[in-house]
Image: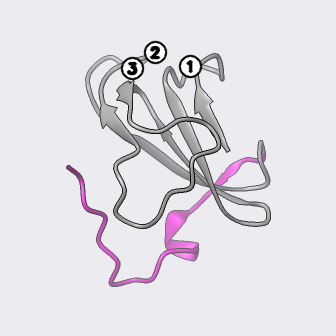
Amino acid sequence: IFVGRRVGGFGRLVVVEHAPMLFSWYAHHSKFAVRQGDAIKKGDLIAYSGKSGRAKGPHLHFEIRQGAFAKSIDPSLILPPSRKLAVR
């Protein structure tokens, strides 16, 4: 639902809506691989890691949020316990 900059200190940010009011945030990218409005599915490349925004070094900032701009929640409350995230 969002691909861009200018949200806090997140630098290049991708926000994905998974269900009504359930979002994942991926931040600090060096380059985007999607555009706002693109349909994506599990395993699709959405961006390349980097150090944009206030990041001190290259990394991926990941959050799960309930509500578009609500406080982030513990991802273990949403993701299954055996789930492993693939980093490319």
Which label's residue is closer to the chain start, 1 or 2?
1
Residues 60 and 33: in front is 33
Q: Give the residue displayed 30% in from the left and 25% down from the top.
A: 50
The boundaries of the magenta stretch are: 70-88
* Amino acid type assigned to the residue bearing label 1 in the image: Gly
In the image, residue 56 above or below residue 1: above
Assess whether mark 3 and mark 2 are in contact (beta carbons under 8 angstroms): yes
Assess whether mark 2 and mark 1 are in contact (beta carbons under 8 angstroms): yes
* Amino acid type assigned to the residue bearing label 3 in the image: Ala
**Horizontal placement of 52 versus 74: left or right?**
left
Image quadrant of residue 44? Answer: bottom left
Q: Give the residue displayed 39% in from the left and 20% down from the top.
A: 55
Q: Furthest-left residue in view?
A: 88
Q: CA distance from mark 1 to mark 3?
A: 8 Å
Q: CA distance from mark 1 to mark 2?
A: 5 Å
In the image, residue 42 above or below residue 16: below
Assess whether mark 3 and mark 1 are in contact (beta carbons under 8 angstroms): no
Q: Residues within 10 Å of mark 3 (few under 14, many from 20)?
A: some
Q: Give the residue displayed 41% in from the left and 44% down from the top.
A: 46
- The residue under label 1 is 9
- The residue under label 2 is 54
In the image, residue 57 above or below residue 39: above
Residue 55: mark: 3
The spot of residue 70 in percent (x, y) is: 78, 47
